[in-house]
Image: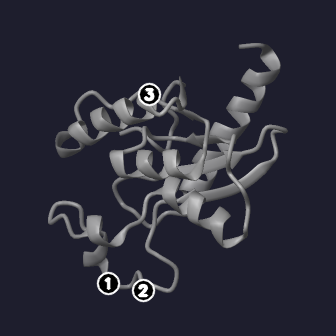
């Protein structure tokens, strides 16, 4: 990687960390930035409740009970949905995210036409998500999505 592309990667991954701070999730702060071929930002997202859904009920964000998995949308899919709401095409774009995408997000990445993902390596021991990360990696590879693994960033690692 040349120094210019490394500079842009660092900027976009840093922006992921900034956007991640908007999340109400107590366990993980994840941010995503979708960038076009000219280094223009097409969409952003963070993990959080869907638009218009109240965050005042703290049990909706509870990880131990598993309740949050029904309520919280992932940063990657939120960025894709935000692009769709604005009528922004994503074919050929790059997704920057500060946590390795799960299998659900991998399907959305593939179906939306993104061509590259820049993220930290998948966590080696993340409990019930281990299999999801493994499946994600397989799907992205089989679909021809270029994966560039970056060092973990502040928001997405734990």
Identify the residue shown where x is 47% and y is 34%: 143
The relative height of residue 77 versus residue 139 in the rendered view (above or below) is below
User: Residue 116: which disc?
Assistant: none
The relative height of residue 146 versus residue 110 in the rendered view (above or below) is above
Secondary structure, mark 3, is: helix
Whole-number angstrom distance, CA of label 3 to CA of label 2: 37 Å
- Residue 12 in the figure: left or right of residue 68: right
User: Residue 54: which disc?
Assistant: 2
Whole-number angstrom distance, CA of label 1 to CA of label 2: 7 Å
**Callouts 3 and 2 close, C-beta under 8 Å:** no
Tell me residue 158's x, y (percent). Answer: 35, 39
**Callouts 3 and 1 close, C-beta under 8 Å:** no
What is the residue that sits farthest to the left in this orientation?
Answer: 65
Whole-number angstrom distance, CA of label 3 to CA of label 1: 39 Å
Residue placed under numbered mark 3 in the picture: 141
Residue placed under numbered mark 1 in the picture: 57
Q: Nearer the viewer, mark 3 or mark 2?
A: 3
Identify the residue shown where x is 72% and y is 70%: 86
- Residue 134 in the figure: left or right of residue 110: left
**Label 3 crowd (10 A; few <14 / some 14-19 / many >=20):** few
Identify the residue shown where x is 28% and y is 64%: 69
**Callouts 1 and 2 close, C-beta under 8 Å:** yes
Q: Quadrant of the N terminus?
A: top right
Secondary structure, mark 1, is: loop
Identify the residue shown where x is 42% and y is 38%: 100
Q: Within the image, what quadrant is residue 20 found in?
A: bottom right
């Amino acid at each position: 990687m040349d120094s210019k592309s490394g500079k842009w990667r660092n900027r976009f991954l840093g922006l992921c960390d900034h956007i991640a701070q908007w999340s109400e999730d107590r366990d993980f702060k994840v941010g995503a930035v979708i960038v076009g071929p000219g280094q223009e930002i097409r969409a952003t997202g963070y993990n959080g409740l869907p638009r218009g859904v109240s965050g005042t009920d703290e049990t909706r964000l509870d990880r131990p009970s598993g309740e949050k998995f029904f309520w919280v949308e992932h940063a990657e899919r939120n960025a894709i949905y935000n692009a769709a709401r604005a009528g922004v095409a994503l074919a050929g774009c790059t997704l920057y995210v500060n946590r390795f995408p799960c299998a659900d997000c991998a399907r959305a990445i593939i179906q939306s036409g993104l061509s590259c993902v820049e993220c930290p390596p998948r966590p080696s021991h993340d409990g019930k998500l281990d299999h999801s990360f493994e499946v994600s990696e397989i799907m992205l590879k089989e679909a021809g999505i270029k994966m560039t693994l970056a060092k973990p960033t502040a928001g997405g690692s734990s």
